[in-house]
Image (cartoon, rainbow, N blue to C red):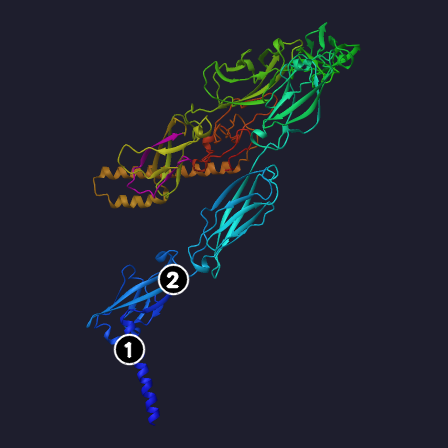
């Protein structure tokens, strides 16, 4: 037990001694830490409070703080746990450069009592910098004459790291001409050289592209690269060469001076002055060649200098030199053979004789137009001449003898299609290339009267308003004759015929030269609606030719006829009509009918009826139909109505301006037999006056009764007579006038009372749009009851083409 206590005592003493020694070392600032560069923020460095023997609770009260003269912000102490950590980025190369040792010195200061501790933090290097060459690209210029094993020093790379991280090794990209040699005297001094393995040839490879790579010894390895551009410098080691050793050229005699014979092209694989070539004649070339030819020293173009004559020299053998401008110069050679060819230098000659012009267009095939002879001064094939004509002409050449030809007609002529031909005769020799000569001959075609005048269309339609002034121009006809001169002079005339009982020339005339057609007299639509005739056109040829054209002249209606009133019955004249009407008739009873016709047509003949207002303010119990003319009662008649009414009916057409007529109708109101006793009783009951007044009333009653009885008897007789009479026969009867309804120029209906002459158009039947005839009624039209008469007024407009003719016949119904 005692031994154990002694051992423990010794241990405590030893521990105390160690603690005192550590405290002494701390007091002298012997704390040492290490940290790697580029460590992240918050990286642990050391437990500085614990290592300094300070309690964590006294760090704040004693104002624990860390200070550094130059790098105080790189490291920081956490006062909560007393740990020293990395506060910001640490770059060893920035702090110490390439120094082998690098540390950060810190001063730790505490108060109460004041103590100062010194701490060193070593910054360890990492491989964070790759090798760097001074330049990205290195250019080397090496002559192609350098011998193999030639050396070219290169500048090595540098690494900002230290130690193994800065130890560099080099390698060169694989290449046929160069290798890399590195002489390592030590790690700090390495000599890098580029060694030429074999001779360079600029003509094969004018440049070489190499890459030199430096690798450091760090983990992981970092590399740097520089590009080596090797340019091979030229030396004059190649002579100029031609594409061929011998050239053969063919050229015609008499070629112009300056004509290119040949353009030589030699090439030199060298460059610069070593590849610049000059051309020249060889010294052995005779003077005669130099007089005939010249060569451009820069382009190698050889041209003619003198006149070449095949008869004197037909072959030249010329030696050409191509010399470069290197040092020393080198030369290449070739031979040019110039063969002079015979040239066809004489053109044929053409002579035209015995011309027979102009040619009639009806000339026979084979007619001789001209004689032609040709000649060529050359010989052999160059003197053989053939003749030809321009294509597409109605002529041909017929050979009559050697170099003699006849120009004859080969096809029919038509002057109206082609009035003249430019015939070109071509004489061509057999030379190569051939020469030719041409001669032009103008062949005019004489006209023959073989074309009649022609109108643009076979028929023309003309519209003329009636009542035209005499001699007015209504149309112009024009015919064209394809012939020429007097054969094309056209004159115009009428084809005379009868229009009814009058000659056509009394209506129209045509100017012989201009073709203008004139109306000689005013035309009347009611007399003549259509005038159809022909105009003849004849030329002045021999014999003359002609043609006809048909003119259809439609006479357009104008409102020149006022409505005409028809007599209601035989024996009635003047414009007034008297009618007796019983007072017992009801509303709508027809008491009379006004009839009228208009000689015009279309809207000009469309009639309407109006009842003129009475002069007095009394109300009239009658009205008239707008288009029928029927006068009817508007209400039941009353005793207060006046016994006599004077009605004025205005009949008006629809022309511009409108024309009118007025009819007067006298209507008397009478009392029939059924109403007489009533009237008499009313008269007796009201007889309170004197005796004379009573006598007058009786007289009036007796007269009224007699009148009504007479009217009733007359009505029965008329009705019986009409029932017994037969229906009218079509196309018979005395002077019943036809009533026409036809289309006007604008396609509307027209109404006419009569037509003395409908249309005159040769042998054809009269043409109208729509004809309606009244039946052949006897002249005593007034015997028919007024209330049962029918009218033929047309109240509708019908669109009918004036060139489509149809005929319709309307009849009054049987009464």
Horizontally, residue 325 falls left or right of residue 53, namely right
Labelled disc at residue 20: 1
The residue lying at 39 percent from left, 56 percent from top is 98
| Residue 188 screen position, x and y as percent | 46, 54
| Residue 495 screen position, x and y as percent | 60, 15
| Residue 80 screen position, x and y as percent | 28, 73
> Dot 2: within a 10 Å radius of its alpha carbon, few (fewer than 14), some, or many (20 or more) residues?
some
The magenta region covers 626-652
Verify CB contact (< 8 Å) between mark 2 and mark 1: no
Q: How many marks?
A: 2
Q: Which residue is mark 2?
A: 37
Between the C-alphas of marks 2 and 1, the distance is 34 Å
21 lies above or below 374: below
Q: Is residue 497 visible?
A: no
713 lies above or below 281: below
Q: Secondary structure at mark 2?
A: loop
Counting residues from the start of the chain, the first of labels 2 and 1 encountered is: 1
**In front of the other: 686 or 222:** 222
| Residue 212 screen position, x and y as percent | 52, 49
**In front of the other: 508 or 433:** 433
| 27 drawn magenta | no
Residue furthest top in the image: 354
**In front of the other: 574 or 433:** 433
Q: Secondary structure at mark 1?
A: helix
């Amino acid at each position: 037990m005692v031994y154990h206590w002694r051992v423990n005592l010794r241990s405590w003493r030893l521990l105390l001694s160690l603690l005192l020694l550590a405290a002494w070392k701390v007091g002298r600032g012997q704390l040492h830490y290490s940290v790697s560069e580029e460590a992240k923020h918050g990286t642990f460095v050391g437990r500085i409070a614990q290592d300094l023997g300070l309690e964590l609770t006294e760090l704040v009260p004693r104002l624990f703080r860390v200070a550094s003269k130059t790098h105080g912000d790189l490291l920081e102490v956490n006062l909560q746990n007393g740990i020293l950590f990395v506060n910001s980025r640490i770059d060893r190369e920035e702090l110490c450069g390439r120094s082998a040792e690098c540390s950060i010195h810190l001063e730790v200061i505490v108060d109460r009592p004041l103590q100062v501790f010194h701490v060193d933090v070593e910054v360890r290097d990492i491989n964070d910098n790759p090798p760097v060459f001074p330049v990205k690209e290195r250019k080397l210029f090496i002559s192609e004459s350098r011998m193999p094993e030639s050396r070219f020093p290169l500048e090595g790379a540098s690494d900002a790291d230290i130690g193994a991280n800065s130890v560099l090794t080099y390698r060169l990209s694989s290449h046929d001409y160069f290798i890399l040699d590195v002489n390592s005297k030590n790690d700090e001094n390495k000599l890098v050289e580029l060694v030429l393995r074999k001779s360079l040839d600029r003509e094969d490879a004018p440049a070489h592209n190499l890459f030199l790579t430096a690798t450091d010894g760090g983990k992981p390895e970092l590399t740097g690269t520089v590009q080596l551009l090797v340019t091979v410098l030229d030396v004059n080691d190649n002579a100029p060469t031609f594409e061929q050793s011998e050239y053969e050229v063919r050229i015609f005699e008499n070629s112009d001076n300056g004509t290119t014979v040949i353009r030589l092209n030699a090439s030199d694989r060298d460059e610069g002055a070593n590849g610049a070539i000059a051309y020249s004649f060889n010294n052995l070339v005779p003077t005669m060649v130099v007089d005939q030819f010249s060569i451009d020293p820069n382009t190698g173009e050889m041209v003619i200098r003198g006149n070449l004559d095949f008869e004197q020299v037909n072959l030249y053998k010329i030696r050409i030199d191509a010399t470069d401008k290197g040092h020393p110069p080198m030369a290449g050679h070739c031979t040019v053979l110039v063969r002079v060819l015979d040239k066809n230098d004489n053109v044929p000659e053409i002579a035209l004789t015995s011309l027979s012009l102009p040619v009639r267009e009806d000339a026979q095939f084979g007619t001789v137009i001209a004689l032609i002879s040709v000649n060529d001064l050359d010989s052999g094939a160059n003197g053989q001449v053939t003749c030809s004509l321009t294509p597409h002409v109605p002529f041909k050449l017929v050979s009559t003898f050697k170099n003699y030809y006849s120009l004859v007609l080969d096809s029919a002529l038509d002057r109206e299609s082609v009035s003249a031909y430019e015939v070109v005769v071509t004489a061509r020799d057999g030379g190569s290339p051939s020469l030719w000569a041409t001669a032009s001959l103008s062949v005019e075609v004489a006209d023959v009267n073989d074309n009649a005048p022609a109108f643009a269309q076979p028929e023309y339609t003309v519209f003329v308003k009636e009542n035209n002034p005499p001699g007015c121009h209504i149309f112009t006809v024009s015919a064209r004759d394809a012939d020429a001169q007097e054969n094309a002079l056209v004159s115009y005339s009428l084809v005379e015929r009868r229009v009814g009982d009058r000659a056509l020339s009394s209506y129209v005339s045509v100017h012989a030269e201009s073709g203008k057609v004139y109306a000689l007299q005013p035309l009347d639509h009611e007399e003549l609606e259509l005038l159809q005739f022909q105009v003849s056109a004849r030329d002045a040829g021999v014999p003359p030719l002609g043609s006809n054209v048909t003119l259809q002249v439609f006479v357009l209606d104008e409102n020149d006829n006022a409505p005409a009133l028809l007599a209601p019955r035989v024996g009635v004249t003047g414009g007034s009509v008297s009618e007796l009407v019983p007072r017992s008739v009801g509303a709508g009873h027809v008491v009379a009918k006004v009839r009228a016709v208009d000689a015009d047509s279309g809207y000009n003949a469309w009639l309407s009826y109006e009842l003129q207002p009475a002069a007095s303010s009394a109300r009239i119990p009658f009205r008239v139909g707008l288009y029928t003319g029927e006068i009817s009662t508007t209400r039941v008649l009353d005793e207060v109505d006046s016994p006599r009414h004077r009605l004025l009916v205005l009949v008006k057409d629809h022309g511009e301006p409108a024309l009118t007529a007025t009819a007067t109708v006298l209507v008397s109101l009478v009392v029939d037999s059924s109403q007489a006793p009533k009237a008499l009783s009313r008269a007796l009951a009201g007889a309170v006056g004197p005796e004379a007044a009573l006598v007058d009333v009786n007289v009036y009653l007796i007269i009224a009764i007699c009148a009504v009885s007479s009217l009733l008897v007359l009505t029965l007789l008329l009705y019986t007579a009409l029932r017994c009479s037969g229906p009218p026969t079509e196309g018979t009867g005395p002077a019943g006038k036809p009533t026409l309804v036809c289309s006007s120029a604008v396609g509307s209906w027209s109404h006419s009372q009569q037509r003395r002459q409908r249309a005159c158009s040769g042998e054809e039947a009269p043409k109208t749009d729509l004809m309606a005839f009244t039946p052949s009624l006897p002249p005593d039209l007034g015997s028919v009851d007024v209330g049962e008469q029918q009218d033929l007024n047309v109240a509708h407009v019908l669109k009918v083409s004036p060139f489509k003719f149809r005929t319709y016949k309307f009849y009054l119904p049987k009464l």
